[in-house]
Amino acid sequence: MKQLKNLDCTNKKIIVRVDLNVPVFEDKITDYSRIHAILPTLEKLTKNKNKVFLIAHFGRPKGEVNKKYSIEFLCPELKKLSNLNKVHFLDSCDQKIIEKKISEMGFGEICLLENIRFNAEEEKNDLNFSKQLSSCFDIYINDAFSASHRNHASITGITKYLPSYAGLSFSKEIENLDKFLENSNKPNLAIIGGSKVSTKIKVLENLVEIFDSLVIGGAMANTFLLSNNYNVGTSLVENDFIELSKKIQKKAESKNCKILLPIDAVCSKKIEDRVNVETYSINNIPNDQMILDVGEQTTKLISDEILKSKSLLWNGPLGAFEYSPFDKSTISVANIIQNYSSKSQLDALAGGGDTLAAIKKAKANDAFKYLSTAGGAFLEWLEGNKSPGFIALRENNF
């Protein structure tokens, strides 16, 4: 795989795939991590006097122009954070319009193209569309690791028509993930949360082969508890994955990987009721209660395991993190990692939007050697799968 860090290019026309699918609440960006991640690539390219065009998506406009999902609002943010005098914007991917814009721009300037998913051809990986996108440029760079699990025109198709390179952020993601998975210090611990076993089956199957201990939290722990004949009341479960949960536990046992499941749970009759909240032993969950977080005894169990570990991987919250007080255990674990990391050589890595939000809320960013901005791509890499975007770069023969 060719990488931008090894490329010396000047006065070129370069098209860069970035991930600017940032979280927005009440018209304000709530997390700038993905913008900050691409700044080193933009700085290198503009400093070397290249004309740089950015491709990005935002939301799911379903192949149609929808002003709700326009990314023009990102231009002033990019200008401010990159210290550029100007960030151009173009609301069309038409070849002639792009050519005209290129002729108007100076070297060392950036132009952001409108949401690439306004074009239905993008998600269909239409090669004619990829060829059209590539036709005005000399080089393609993928700096969107977090979107590279998608087999889309601007991620895989375009590499068939241009010399293609991994951006600085893309390379950094891969290097850190591979280094951690291949060389993490023992004993090592993985904490995997989230709502569904179905989305993380392959991740769990891979991790039990690598890690000494595995904490399973979030709503997906309910399916594991049910597979062990615990009553989980009205909690979210995936009945179709009970047998697979049993198989994962058997595989973990054969690989000497200790699985830690909740031993107590914070419950309510419904997630909207955050007043009538009780903590129960996992042996005594009432039939009308829903598990919404792990309890203090489970948090203590996780804490003890963290204190034994030299390496730690974390993906996914331990409870219904979006709703207080069901965020308590997730925040507590972030604080525990922060405190332990400051006193030891804990090698910690985390990824996934909710996980990063919890770490940020706990002001525990410094406890982690690396924080991945990727979600789905992060999980696929943990599964042991190389993303379509990575494979496309690796197979690029220009």
Image: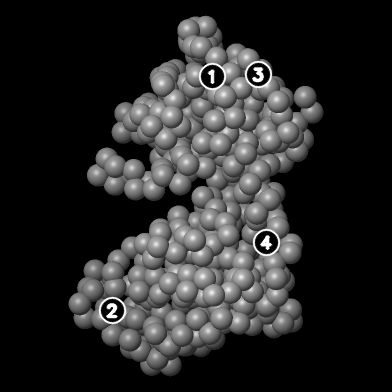
Residue type, mark 3 in image: Thr
Quadrant where the N terminus is found in the figure: top right
- The tag on residue 268 is 2
Q: Which residue position is annotated with label 1?
A: 108
Residue with the most extreme left position = 275
Residue with the mark numbered 4:
180
Mark 1: secondary structure = loop
**Disc 3 target residue:** 10
Q: Amino acid at mark 1?
A: Gly
- Whether tag 4 and tag 3 are in contact, CB under 8 A, the answer is no
For the residue pair 328 and 77, the one nearer the viewer reads as 77
Seen from the viewer's position, the closer of residues 83 and 34 is 83
What amino acid type should be assigned to the residue bearing mark 4? Phe
Query: Which comes before the other along the chain, label 3 or label 1?
Result: 3
Figure check: 185 above or below 16: below
Residue shown at 40%/62% (left/top)?
Answer: 363
